[in-house]
Image (tube, rainbow, N blue to C red):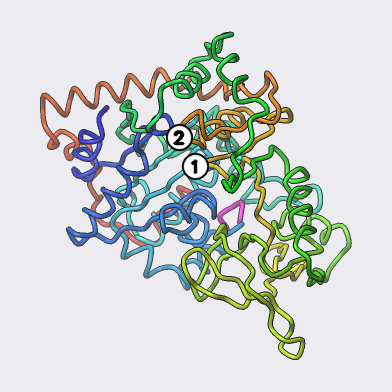
Amino acid sequence: MRQSEALAILGSGASVFLTGAPGAGKTYVLNEFIRQARADGASVAVTASTGIAATHINGTTIHSWSGIGLATALTDNLVETVRTRRKRKLQEADILIIDEVSMLHAWLFDMVDRICRIIRRDERPFGGLQVVLSGDFFQLPPVSVSGRNNDLIAPSAEYLASRERYMRAGLNPEGFVTESLVWRELNPVVCYLTEQHRQDDGQLLNVLTDIREGAVDDGDRNVLLTRLGAIPEPGQQAVNLFPVNRQADALNDLRLFEIKEEPHEYLAESEGAANLVERLKKNMLAPERLCLKTGAAVMAVRNDTDHQYVNGSLGTVRGFTTQSQGGWPIVEFENGNIVTMKPNSWQMQDGDTVLATVKQVPLRCAWAITIHKSQGMTLDRAVMDLRRTFAPGMGYVALSRVEGLDGLYLQGVNERMFLVSPDAVRLDGQLRLESAQAADTLASDGVGAFRARMPQPAAGEDDEFAQDVLF
């Protein structure tokens, strides 16, 4: 499907799943649709599955926008909290954008649907919002987190009941959004972009295409081998991508050591049971022991309540406050904001009870980042070691961060870097078929055909409609 066709379908008001290979123009189409919708007076909620992805589209996380946060089940208390804090935002929205949807769990997608229905008092999927999803299932799949603390905290009755519904439906709550309970009811129009807009001689693009189709051959391997051992020219900056945090941390430590000044050290403070505190420290992105120097490249790892930066914002340490003022790092972010970074809190809760808390300055060094954190970025140059890729799509995401072969610098390769999700391969043919059918419908019947498939509001809705049905 062409970009112009996707924009026409989006303009009809229909819910859409926008997909395609890197370089097909998903971000361009999203931004153009958002611009036009806002010009027409629509209220557009722009969100993404992760904080870093949200920074690429000037949005927020779907967790934050919906008010769900880190919850894994929709309880009565959570509904009341969202009603108190997010009711106005959820009711005012006309369009909900969710970018990088490949990293969104089916169960979370369903939770957002349910909370929108309840708060908006509308039985239609997502309370009648036009939902626009964007992403590529060949990239990184969701990281399973819904049951991450079940060995420490007994799962709630709501959590267990929700998992039983998925089991009865034969769906995987930890899978892609296509495994969600609401997917068939939402029935989004699939817009699979097929044009390619990257300025490449075709060599890297051919490799990426063969990875998607499971047809990697010796020709593809030989193309990549031409970049093995290549290094950037003197003075050229390149981001280093690694499969695991440990490798990224090692390079960050080296670069920090090369800055000839004494480091400023910040140790995390904690409260609560030792096993819960350790779990919190493992899951939070800020290191337990944070060392910084003037000139260090850093990334924010929490959202700022004053909206000066978000989770994923990149910046440079410009100095530190005096010891009498706390000695906190002063960071100039790429958006131009200069912020004194003070400690933030990570908490583990059971309902409304706080079981453990860890406080730390919400920063980490960012000369090197993991492949997971790079998803959605387009880089001029990237240095990567793919010998330890382990998740389906990890190698594909890393290789597709650069626009052309000349921006790719490989330090190590492994056959596992060609692995992609079997579910993505299974879905791809169906998504292409549905997209082609949508393009044919647009050509023969015009945009009116997509307005006709939008669900209409039911009469006599009330605020409690969903309590029996959804819980």
Instruction: In the displayed orientation, state which residue is furthest to the front.
Output: 234
Q: Main secondary structure of the magenta part?
A: loop
In this rendering, would 352 be left or right of 250?
Answer: left
On the image, the x and y values in percent for residue 341 come to: 64, 74
Q: Which mark is residue 403?
A: 2
Residue 414 in view: yes
Tell me the number on the disc at residue 168: none
The amino acid type found where label 2 is placed reads Glu
Q: Quadrant of residue 200?
A: top left
Task: Please report the residue visible at 54 percent of the width from the left and 60 percent of the height from the top.
Answer: 313
Q: Secondary structure at mark 1?
A: loop
Q: Considering the image in quadrants, where does the N terminus appear?
A: top left
* Residue 373 among those drawn in magenta: no
Q: Are marks 1 and 2 in contact (CB under 8 Å)?
A: yes
Location of residue 300 in the rendering, given as x and y in whole percent from the top left corner: 61, 63
The alpha-carbon separation of the residues under discs 1 and 2 comes to 7 Å
Count every numbered label the image shows and give the total: 2
Dot 1 alpha-carbon crowd within 10 angstroms: few under 14, some 14 to 19, many 20 or more: some
How far from the left and from the top, in percent, is residue 183?
41, 36
Q: Residue at x 26, y 48 (%)?
A: 33
Name the residue that disc number 1 marks.
Answer: 380
Q: Name the spot of residue 370 as percent of width and height, x first.
A: 66, 44
Circle 2 — which element?
loop
Asked whether 340 or 114 is in front, the reply is 340
Above/below status of 391 relative to 437: below
Q: Residue furthest bottom?
A: 324
Q: Amino acid at mark 1?
A: Asp
The range drawn in magenta is 71-76
